[in-house]
């Protein structure tokens, strides 16, 4: 029972980290696009 909860927590942590990475990546792409547009 306890081990399955730990596995679930690891999956949730992995997913949230992945989502945060995607958000950061999207923001970085937007910044690059804006900088290129200004030039």
Image: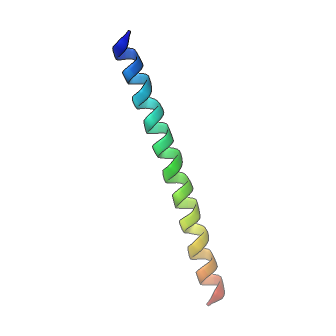
The residue sitting at the top extreme is 1
Residue 16 position, x and y percent, is 50, 41
> Where 13 sits versus 28, above or below?
above
Judging depth in this view, the residue of 12 and 35 nearest the camera is 12
Residue with the most extreme left position: 3
Give the tally of numbered discs.
0
Is 30 positioned to the left or the right of 14 in the image? right
Q: Residue at x 56, y 55 (%)?
A: 23
Q: Residue furthest bottom?
A: 39
| 21 relative to 5, above or below | below
Which quadrant would the N terminus be assigned to in this image? top left
Answer with left or right where residue 26 lies relative to residue 17. right
Q: How is the image coloured?
A: rainbow
Residue 37 is situated, as x and y percent measured from the top left of the image, at 65, 83
On the picture, is 16 further left or further right than 3? Answer: right
The image quarter in which residue 36 lies: bottom right
Residue 24, above or below 14: below
Measuring from the top left, give residue 22's x and y in whole percent: 53, 52
Quadrant housing the C terminus: bottom right
Residue 4 location (% of width, % of height) = 39, 16
Residue at 57% x, 67% y is 29
Question: Which residue does the image show at 49% across and 38% down from the upper left?
Answer: 15
């Amino acid at each position: 029972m306890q081990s399955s909860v730990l596995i679930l927590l690891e999956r949730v942590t992995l997913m949230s980290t992945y989502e945060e990475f995607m958000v950061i990546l999207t923001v970085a792409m937007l910044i690059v696009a804006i900088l290129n547009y200004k030039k």
